[in-house]
Amino acid sequence: MLIHNALFWLRKDLSASERNAFATEVRRLATIPYLQSGFVGTPAQTEHRFVVDHSFDFATSLHFKSLGDHEFYQTKCEYHAKFVSICQSLWERVVVYDIAP
């Protein structure tokens, strides 16, 4: 299993329509059929503490059954390729944390 977490900081100058387009496209990633599970969200309204980062706009947590499925996602998955093609110009920063449980 591999858990692929990506945090996105959107450009500050996006229109409401562009933000909605990003939200629609990023949520599609959680519906990729070969995922074990997938989640997309915004920062939780948890307590503000020194160790908690609420500064991102959206995050994904995509759970792959194998490293091979993750590699397919990165190199050949049409869902991911479409997302990057449509949305890459909408973010200013992305940070990825891949976890092997």
Image (cartoon, grey):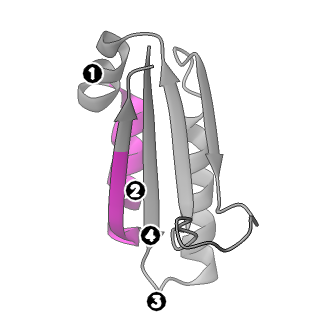
Please give the residue where the numbered disc 1 appears in the rendered image: 71
In the foreground, 16 or 93: 93
Please give the residue where the numbered disc 3 appears in the rendered image: 13
- Marks 3 and 1 in Cβ contact (< 8 Å): no
- Badge 2 element: helix
Looking at the rendered image, the quarter that the N terminus falls into is: top left
In the foreground, 6 or 29: 6
Amino acid type indicated by mark 3: Asp
Question: Which mark identifies residue 9?
Answer: 4
Sequence-wise, which precedes: disc 2 or disc 4?
A: 4
Q: How many angstroms separate mark 1 from mark 2 (CA)?
A: 21 Å
Height in image: 91 above or below 37?
A: below
- Marks 4 and 1 in Cβ contact (< 8 Å): no
Tag nearer the camera, 2 or 3: 3
Q: Is residue 33 left or right of residue 92?
A: right
Please give the residue where the numbered disc 2 appears in the rendered image: 86
The magenta-colored residue range is 77-96
